[in-house]
Image (tube, rainbow, N blue to C red):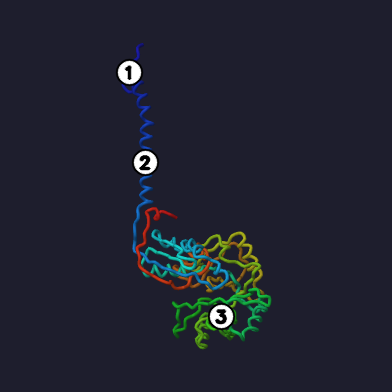
Amino acid sequence: MPHSDNGFSDPPDRIETNTKKFPAVLIAVGVVLLLALATGVAFAWLYQGSVPGTRLVYSVQRSDIHSDAVTSDEMVEPLRQRLRHLFAAGLAVHALDENQVEIIVPTRDPVELALAKRLLRTAGVLRFLPIANQTHHANLLNLVKASSQTPTASRDVLDENGSVVGRWVTVGRDAAATTVDDVTPLTVQLNSLTVRDAQTGEVLQMPSSVLGNDSEVKIARWMNSQNIPSIDVLAVVESEHAVGGEDLAFAAATFDRNGNPAVAINFTDAGAAKMLALTTANAHVGTTQTQLGIVLDDQLLTAPKILQPIRSEARITGDFTRAETDFIVQILKAGQLPAKLNPEPISETQVSASYRLVDLISP
């Protein structure tokens, strides 16, 4: 029976021709896409834009032997890390000489500029230090009392061998929480009576009546009566299991059980082991509970009581605003600086901050 065409099949020669054309079309499309991508990348690299900016020049603070060895070149990348999440493009950090760094921030907004300056002058040294009490740390307190006749501005307390065994840390005041009688309470509750005048270094013995409930207000009232604007409290330095910012694996803004802003932190394996040893050594004895001071740049952020050993994770809680917890997280994520900058810039001028399009997508 003769074959008949049903009208739906292409002749063999047409099928072969279309088959040959298809790869050629794919190649052509691929070439066009690659050219477009290359053009876009080149444009992103080469295009220069600019925004209003501010040029800040800071000098490296030379306050100890460690900072003397730090060059401004070593400050460049840590400073950039501090600010890179705040500014998407136009940020530039350069070393001008051995002692000075130039930071160009792409903003002239006073609020953003104030935040940038605060990030720059915060060294970011985080420490977890027990607050000294008579039950656990009688030797340290007796050492301080014995030397109280010679006030000093030094924060370190040395033993007879010259080893650092204590550290004076500053207790802040909560400016947003004044009482009806215009008393500005402390930001942290204390159960230690041994403090010093933060300005003169004079060791003070507070009356026992200021401790207990509302100690933040009671101590502030006592300070006002003694004309003492600021106090330091004595913290314990235990070198065998010292815990610091380098022991953190994670930090994030969160909330405490009452819905107030807090900072969640996780420790590395090594950090968790040290924290367990530190909190076990300072576990409560009878009715005495040791406070664990969480200290950032010698400022006492909070001092919760050690109710049980702490291992891999913890929360930093206190009278924080969300902006304050975000600031603390940003500092902890960026890490501490090799050395501190002097608090105030040497110069501050308005400039144009230049950027490339690729900066907008860089991590």
Identify which residue is drawn at 46% across, 62% down: 80
Q: Is residue 348 above or below residue 213?
A: above
Q: Alpha-carbon distance for marks 2 and 3?
A: 67 Å
**Quarter of the image with the C terminus in it:** bottom left
Q: Looking at the rendering, which quadrant does residue 160 occupy? A: bottom right
Q: Is residue 172 visible?
A: yes
Quadrant for residue 283, please give it: bottom right
Q: What residue type is labelled 2?
A: Leu
Q: What residue type is labelled 1?
A: Asp
Position of 312 compared to 74: left or right?
A: right
Q: Quadrant of the N terminus?
A: top left
Which residue is pictured at 35% across the width and 21% down the height?
13
Q: Name the residue under label 3.
A: 153
Residue 144 image position (x, y, % from top left): 63, 81
Query: The disc labelled 3 sits on which kind of residue?
Result: Ala
The residue under label 2 is 33
Q: In which quarter of the image is residue 35?
A: top left
Q: Earlier in the sequence, mark 3 or mark 1?
A: 1
Furthest-left residue in this view: 7
Is 359 on the left-hand or right-hand side of 71? left
- Label 3 packing within 10 angstroms: few (<14), some (14-19), many (20+): few
The secondary element bearing badge 2 is classed as helix
Which residue matches tag 1?
Answer: 5
Q: Which mark is residue 102?
A: none
Q: What whole-number distance in Å separates the C-alpha atoms at marks 3 and 1? A: 105 Å
Q: Residue furthest top?
A: 1
* Residue 301 picture location, percent across and down: 52, 72
Q: Is 98 drawn above or below residue 285 in the view shown?
A: above
Residue 254 appears in the rendering = no
